[in-house]
Image (spheres, coloured by chain):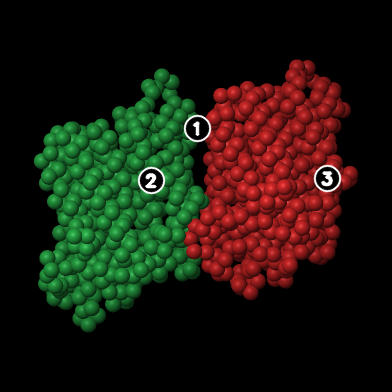
Amino acid sequence: MMSLQTAMLVGLLAPLVVALLTPFLAVRHIWRDAAGPIGGVITFIAALEVAMAVRDGQTPRLFVAQIAEGLAIEFAVTPLGAIFGLVASGLWILAALYTVGYMRGNHEKHQTRFTAFYAVAVHAAMAVAWSGNLLVLFIFYEILTFSTYPLVTHKESAAARNAGRLYMSILVGTSVVLLLPAVVWVWLSTGTLDFRPGGFLAGQIDPAIAPILLGLFAFGVGKAALMPIHRWLPAAMVAPTPVSALLHAVAVVKAGVFTILTVVVYVFGIDFLAKTGASDWLVWLAAFTILASSMVAITKDDIKARLAYSTISQLSYIVLGAAIASSMAVQGAALHIVMHAAGKITLFFCAGAIYVQAHLTKISELDGQGREMPWVFAAFFIGALSIIGIPPLGGSWSKFILMVGAVEAGYIVILAVLGLSSLLNVYYLLEPLSRAFFRDKTRVIDVAFHPLVVVPPVLTALISIGLFFFDEIFLDLAILASRGQQ
Amino acid sequence: MGAAIITNLPALLVAVPLLLAPVSALLHSASLAWMLTLIGAGSSFIAALMLQSITENGVRISYHLGNWEPPWGIEFVVDSATSLTLVVMTGLGFIATLAARRLVSSEINDKDSGKFYAAWMLVSGGLFGLVMTADAFNLFVFLEISALASAILIGMGAGTDRRALVAGFHYLVIGAVGATFYVIGVGFIYAMTGTLNMGDMAARIPEAGGGAVLHVGFGFMVAGMLVKAAIFPVHIWLPAAYSYAPSAVSTLLAAIATKAALYVLARIVFTIFGGVPEIADIALSNVIVPLAIGGIFIGTVMAIYEADIKKMFAHSSVAQIGYIALGLGLTTPAGVSASFIHIANHALIKGGIFMAIGGFVAALGARANLDSITGIGRRMPITATAFLICGLSLAGLPLTAGFISKLYLVRAVLETESYLILALVLISSALSIVYLWKIMEVMWMQPAPVRSPKLAENPAIYLPLWIVAFGNIWFGIDASWLVAAARSAATALLGGGV
């Protein structure tokens, strides 16, 4: 067993080491390609160690540097951070395997650059997860944006460059114009940036301006893709699918909602928000985003675009949970980070597998192709059911708890919103399957079988099932997170 | 002997470069002249560091030139604000000198090199004197020394681009107008107070009882320095001067020249006129703050629409000077320390950027513009990576020096509760990423044109460049020293008294 500090160091540095070694390992492709999965396993073990300690009530800490008076680079793992760290590192293992299959199967260029920046992004995500104060969170939030830029523009085509511009301008723009002043505002009015259970803003700021500060955070965190700042996410789908799968369904977007959840729980404090009603407006905006993006998703024929809008909708579930600011809702939101991650990465893996093996990108092209790729579509089916929230799949827990939380806090209308959203999910996520299995084949496609793109989605689908039965650690952590003042 | 050197440090800081300059002018060997300059620059840096360590805890050194007591003799004053500015200027001056050897040999005739380095040392010595002197007229003398020498250096870019001559001439004329404004202002104040010593001026101005003469004198002095510091809208000399000057000169000027003028501006407003806040504060909040914001936007927008890389960053300098001036304009301790932090960090950022561009120009043998540097990231990875680091620092990416500047400036503005200014600062900061990204995209995300020749990277350029790039990261992670020094500088400036 490693000491906790060592575990934290390992968890933070392993992805960085992978990134730095990749250019040197590039002489032998097998070495380079093995580095990612191995790094993933090491990171995950460290994350598990840390999460266990957090579950036992500890707060693992790691001090790195003192930037200036009152500004420290310090990591301190909160229960929420432990959850996010587990998700990011665990799914990285499978995503790294999948990346190898995808990039090789697709004959993509610049694989070394791709693998290196991919690992840097994971490093940034881990650092976001374990950050001990708002400054560290902000620092690695920005690094996450910059490190994913080369991945989004990987194809170096004009379309990729345009998407990259939109990506950078929205994510960096919102973080500089809104998030940074929000962080500085907190610093100025309280003199500290350290996360504290139960929050530390109560009594330090005027409750009347709390909604404004919350708004700076909610819109400043562009990665949470709250409408109307969601446009970067569909644009980022121009990236190779491994990026969409791990980063734009898990690491990057979850870093966004994680930030909002962390700010609500450890900076504002849910009691403060619940008492002042400062987050009331955010409940309705999140509800609107949930429904509106589901509607948009229905109109999308491109598989990845549809999944992207589905992600926007699902992210707002988590924002909704944070905004409701009851302990049940926060639990639901925290769990949804896990459940949605497992489900959505499965769907993206499948979309990529379909592209690599059959070169299909549109839902209307899937007619009758189900039997050609049975494993892929089976995994897709399970992933979709989990997102919809049907037992016995992980996604049913988080939705259920979220609904209870909404009712508990008196938001009855939200119950209807969540129900309606599930119905829309059923439609737009199961349509590809019904086409694949119940329509006649319109054209014959030569499907090449690539095991490395098929096995990961099957595994993540199994994880989605497993999460229904073995969700204790996540549930424990979520309950810890929602408990507030300790 | 040691003690004698330490007590005479302020004089040596100015005298050494000024005395070495004529020696260098007589040398025919470029290498020898460069060595001499390097020794001069290195010893200035050491001297500045020593002064900084003496003054950082609030000690104030008053040095009487030739042992003539002020107000009859000329007085040099070094406090923590002066010494921080000097450390930044001499440090970057030294690194710019390190890189100058290769940059100069590719752009300047060998037989002119001796004279080039002579002018280089005159600029440095003049600017150091400008910062230290506590005599208002002596300041004008140093202003002229550095301005004439700068014009020569800028004009020497004519070997590669004839437009350098026009740029140098503009600089000379506009700079002379600025200096003249300043000296007219000094005349008025002298007539009123009967002294040229800044400390005495500061003491007598409140007694002299305001009136039109005071206002006019103040206005002329400030206006003159606005020109010298290249604050919008009197910044027009700067873009051409920086972009047509030889690369080594761009590096030196961008890193140290306007910083000295900004420092003097702060001295005029806070020290000389510190006793009449009703005048000084009006100038700051009604003139300097709006102009600073104007400069921030004009500089950023011009940079976005510029295709020539050197010019783009020259425009960006106008914007960055705006940030520094804005911090001063806030008149709060937090604002002034934010300015000092950015004076240091911006010197690091722009010094590195212009050095890297010099490296590109030397390798390409042509001006650097968005076409010619296409795909240069893979052709010159060492230089381009350092450029990338400095660029990210300019954009204010966390863990770089630029982020620290931004953090403290935002904090200072937020503290004064001027939300409009805050919004404008943040928006412009986000806009600055546009021009930066345009370059990064071209450099890294586009393939080099086919059949482009291999470009050689030169360690003599990229080693100093990497020192600066490393500094950008170092001061982004451990800014304790800088933040403390800047706070102490702000206290010294705002505390009144020369």
Both marks 3 and 1 on one chain: no
Looking at marks 2 and 1 on the same chain, the residue that comes earlier in the sequence is marked by 1
Amino acid type, residue under disc 1 in the picture: Met
| Label 2: element kind | helix
Q: Which mark is residue A316?
A: none
Residue B389 at x, y = what percent? 45, 43
Q: Which residue is mark 1?
A: B445
Q: Residues within 10 Å of mark 3 (few under 14, many from 20)?
A: many
| Label 3: element kind | helix
Q: Which mark is residue A467?
A: 3
Q: Is residue B57 above or below residue B480?
A: below
Callout 1: chain? B
Both marks 3 and 2 on one chain: no
Residue A348 at x, y = what percent? 73, 35
Q: Is residue A27 above or below residue A300?
A: above
Query: Can residue B147 be spotted in the picture?
Result: no
Closer to us: mark 3 or mark 1?
3
